[in-house]
Image (cartoon, grey):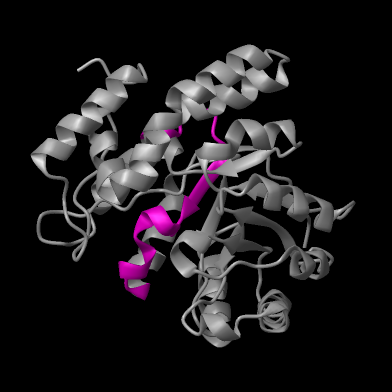
Amino acid sequence: MAFIHIRGVIPPMITPFDENDKVDYDKFRRNIEKWNGYDLAGYLALGSNSETVYLTEEEKLKLIELTVKHKKTGKIVVAGTGMESTSATIDLTNKAADLGADCALIVTPFYYGGKMNDEALINFYTDVADNVKVPTMIYNVTKFTHVNISPSAVSVLCKHPNIIGMKDSSGNVSQLIDFKRAAGDAEFNLMVGTASIWYPALNLGVKAAVMALANCCPDECIEIQKEFESGNLEKARELYERVFPVNSAVTGKYGIAGLKHTCDLLGFEGGYVRKPLLELKETEKTELIEILKKAKVYKG
């Protein structure tokens, strides 16, 4: 398979739900059509911010299908197809490939986290990569999995011809440097998974990011990279610092409900969260609006 070079910003697309806890596919499609107007690198269907762990397989496949159908020509489609077992991961990844996904993002198995050592993770990712129809990438998101893949494991996996990169959402800059060193000269897309370290990552030579903030503030996320790569480092840093509190709010303090409410406020289709997640309280909505105003992304 041909290597896919990824450069730029990718949103881990939110999944809008209606008041009856059903996926609102029309809102999902409208988001894609609006995001098509931005200079994004592509889309991630079924990321952590997609509430993927709450989706059925039927819903997952429908969302991948809609993403492939409605995305703008030239944008890549990444599908988050990691499951707890190797066989289930292979099965879902190949179904995603059949629907037109360009590559798969595979989260570290985590339920038996104490046994997910280097040997287990190397075997897992190797077995998956050997048996799927599209290139794969490692997804390290310690916040949710409590499993942290090691640089030494990455140094082995990056040499596999069908493992083309990784998304590191740990937010740990020193570890990002270790991952970069582990990949060495390998053809490997090292991507950050949070806007909280987007500017530091660019300074380290990282070229791509998959980040929640791109759902609601795609232009700002894109502009940070454009300004940086144009040599306007001060402008890039100032923009990064200005939107940093928004990222902290929508990925930390207020969670996915906060991200979705922000999307609603900024012209995208947020919709409801899926239970057992809770909607924002009115006081939280007021607090969030103040953060958005201070960051100059919302006028009210």
What x and y, as percent, mark residue 232? 68, 12
Answer whether residue 27 is visible to the viewer in this image.
yes
Tell me if residue 30 is in the magenta stretch: no
Tell me if residue 56 is in the magenta stretch: yes
What x and y, as percent, mark residue 159? 84, 66
Q: Is residue 258 left or right of residue 169?
A: left
**Residue in the image at 73% along x and 15% along y:** 231
Q: Which span is picked out in magenta?
A: 34-57
- The answer to which of 78 and 54 lies nearer the viewer is 54
What x and y, as percent, mark residue 128? 66, 78
In the figure, residue 107 lies in which quadrant? bottom right
In the figure, residue 162 lies in which quadrant? bottom right
- The answer to which of 130 and 207 lies nearer the viewer is 207
Q: Is residue 53 left or right of residue 108?
A: left
Viewport quadrant of the C terminus? top left
What x and y, as percent, mark residue 43? 50, 46
**Residue in the image at 70% along x and 38% along y:** 207
Q: Residue furthest right?
A: 185
- Up/down of 283 relative to 235, above or below: below
**Residue in the image at 83% along x and 52% along y:** 181
Viewport quadrant of the N terminus? bottom right
**Residue in the image at 67% along x and 78% along y:** 121
Answer whether residue 217 is visible to the viewer in this image.
no
